[in-house]
Image: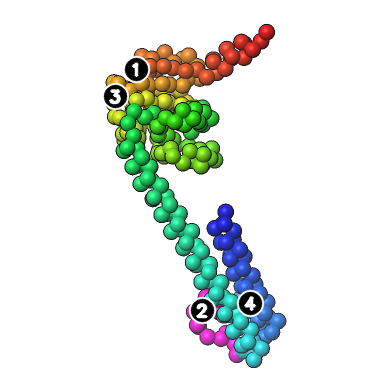
Amino acid sequence: MVNWNFRRNLTILVAGLFIGGTCGYVLIEGWSVFDAVYMTMITLSTVGYGETQELTTSGRAFTSVLIACSVLCMACWTAGITSVIVSGELSGSFRRKKEKKMIRDMNGHTIVCGGGLLARTVVDKLRREQKQLVVITDDDTEEISQMRELYPEVPFIEGNPQSELLLAEAGILKASSLVAALDSDFSNLLIAITGRGISEKLQVICCAKGNELASRMFKVGANEVICPQVLGGEQVADLIA
């Protein structure tokens, strides 16, 4: 937020200098708007093309002030933008390297595929039990950003959870469990097929919204298939006196 405010304020200041410079040349020198805009542009950019028209003493004093302000603002604006870009790239690169090292050190962990509320609930429960896990998701939502902030010790891999390469990157050969918690039953079925094809010892747990694909999940090797809506309905019924 600080970086954004810094860039925004500097951008507003540069725009203000441009407008102020244009108005200054129009009022002080009596130039046309086009000449004033051109003179302001070459002054702020410090390209040194020379005066558009001969300046009066007041105009030269105004230009000197405008150059001093523009040099300072442009330097700060450029430094701010560069800092944001570099820091963002470095922090992202550092985070990825850190997460890869964390995964390499894991053994017997759980791989959670998904980024919705169901996956978040699973992650929260596993973290409270202090279990190791890796999250694979292709969702780019505010919820994923919140999960990263809440669980900085949990590695996140961005991409299609059905990919064998990403599952391998998540350390599936050393993992003990694979949870398919995407919103799509078909995607969860494919994850179960892929996971079981990689490791026969892996515990595969799938989530399903209905019974149509639940039986197929068992057939392709899922150890457990959970239907959250069915369980929720049963709990609601149990609460009725």
In-front residue for pair 140/4: 4
Tell me which amino acid carries mark 4: Gly
**Residue at 34% across / 37% down in the picture?**
103
Q: Which residue does the numbered mark 4 point to in the structure image?
A: 21
Q: Which residue does the numbered mark 1 point to in the structure image?
A: 221
Mark-to-mark CA distance, 1 and 4: 72 Å
Mark sitting earlier along the chain (2/3): 2
Q: Which residue does the numbered mark 3 point to in the structure image?
A: 199
Tell me which amino acid carries mark 1: Gly
Tell me, yes or no, whether the two marked residues, 1 and 2, touch with CB atoms within 8 Å. no
Mark sitting earlier along the chain (1/2): 2
List x then y, in percent, for residue 114: 46, 31
List x then y, in percent, for residue 54: 60, 90
In-front residue for pair 108/33: 108
Q: Which region shows up in magenta?
A: 42-54
Q: Which mark is residue 46?
A: 2
Tell me which amino acid carries mark 2: Thr
Q: Is residue 144 visible?
A: no
**Residue 195, placed above or below residue 219:** below
